[in-house]
Amino acid sequence: MKLSRWLILLLALLSAGLLVGAGLAIPNAGSQVTIERKVLAGDPEAADGVELTLPLTCGSQIFWVTTFPAGRPEEAETVFSTTLSRHTYSPPQENTPISVEISSYYGWDSAWGALEEQVWNDTPPGEERTYTFVLTDYFDAWPLNIRPSTDYYLEGERLSELFQSYFSIPIPEGTQIKITVERSADGNSGSYYYEANLPLMESYAAAQGERAIFALSNSYTASDGPGTDRLIALDGSQIPGGWGIYRYTPNEAHTDGTIETLWSLPEESIVVDFWGIEDGREFFLLTQEEGQLRLRIFDEEVHLVQTLDLLPFSETETYMQVYKGNGFFVPITYGPRGERYCYRFAVVSRQTDGWSLAFTGDNWEATQLRRGSFSWAHDSRHGLDMAFDGQRLAIRDSSEYDSQPFYLAIYSKDGLEYLADYYNSASRAGNTLYTAFPHSSVQTSWIEEQLVCWTETSS
């Protein structure tokens, strides 16, 4: 194909260092990308009003940004550019003012350094030995790792002391950790191996000026092998106010700070996610309660203003993520292996009087066609993007780094209305040339603009 020939020329010039930005005269055959559509389900006319953007890069120096109506891919238009300097796009990262975790047994900030030093000193050079420790003999509570952004940093150890004191999470009696140390013959080097089932505690935080509003996960999944997963609750009885939503405020000199519990979680409630909007006016908490995925919405003072039940959510299901769009968001869960990990989602949109559940759906029908699974939001390699017009949710995603193909699915309260694959000539040419030119791989490139949008809204 023509694009293959011109891609070979581009790659050869790129390798020789002869590309000089846009000054290189390249015929349209090399700079334009053609799109093909394959409708898999639904009405082809359901895609009317949807516009798609496909950003691709080769070697992080050749770029195509192709835009086209989802229902008329033959009208695709491409903006082509080249650069000798490495030029990459990165997805926007959510601001995480502070992170709180139970200390793991790896990394520079591991709390187990004193135990490592003890077993090292007790092990002769050239030998390997295993030591077992009962953690309650050494710690009053689970040791925490606190990772603040620069704005929330306190001098010295005060930040860790503050959080460790407030979040004193008891270690169950009899909890053990085994450390195996192997020292070299000269005693100057060696390695450590751990055997322990340490709990995983995640934190979710949003900035509000110089303050951080945050929540902590209050349970974790443990397993003794395949099919033995079980949910274990963390003990929050020593936390003032118990599990809930908290506020951390540093003083003006950043020499000290305070923590307070703003809202307490009901018993048997499991935290699965928490986030806030950028200006700190609203906060959102997702929990698993009474077999439901429950949403609570708080105002800027963290006063509860709304509660919505979104989806049935049993202990056999897993929460994945929430996709955050402009004026809407989509929490996503998935089921057990026996259901082929069927994804369920809820579409929540902003209305004049608050937030409302627009509809719920699942990807079961799309799964039968080997499409419809979700990649992670903010992963530029796949390009998950969504748009909501008030009645219909458009989802653009791909399981491949080169978006070959990517799919577009459109859902409404009536279910799946449209599903189609889209193929592009640039990725196809790159795949053809990959053996001869390893740098010819064409991949999805992140751009700030939406990859899917509605140009026409529902009537």
Image (cartoon, rainbow, N blue to C red):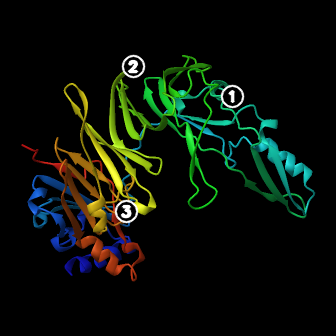
Residue 378 visible? The answer is no
The residue under label 3 is 60
Which of disc 2 and disc 3 is earlier in sequence? 3
> How many numbered marks have been drawn onto this rendered protein structure?
3
Q: Residue at x 45, y 61 (%)?
A: 337
Name which quarter of the figure residue 404 lies in: bottom left
Asked if labels 2 and 3 touch by Cβ distance under 8 angstroms, the answer is no
Task: Looking at the image, tell me whether mark 3 or mark 1 is earlier in sequence order.
Answer: 3
Instruction: Give the amino acid type for the residue marked by disc 2 in the picture.
Output: His
- Left or right placement of residue 358 versus residue 298 in this view: left
Picture coordinates of residue 427, whole percent (x, y): 29, 71
In the rendered view, would you say 27 is above or below 67?
below
Query: What residue sits right under mark 2 in the picture?
Result: 303
In the image, what residue type sits under mark 1? Glu
Q: Residue furthest right?
A: 124
Instruction: Say which element carries label 3.
Output: loop
313 left or right of 388?
right
Q: Could you tell me the amino acid type at mark 3?
A: Ser
The location of residue 330, given as percent across then percent down, is 31, 44
Which residue is painted at 58% across and 29% down in the image?
153
Viewer-proximal residue among 66 and 359: 359
- Quote the CA–CA distance across marks 2 and 1: 32 Å
Instruction: Give the image location of residue 209, x and y in percent.
Output: 43, 23
Q: Residues within 10 Å of mark 1 (few under 14, many from 20)?
A: few
Q: Quadrant of the C terminus?
A: top left
Label 2 vs 1, first from the N-terminus? 1
CB within 8 Å, label 3 to label 1: no
User: Circle 2 — which element?
Assistant: loop
Q: Which residue is mark 1?
A: 157
Quadrant in which the N terminus appears: bottom left
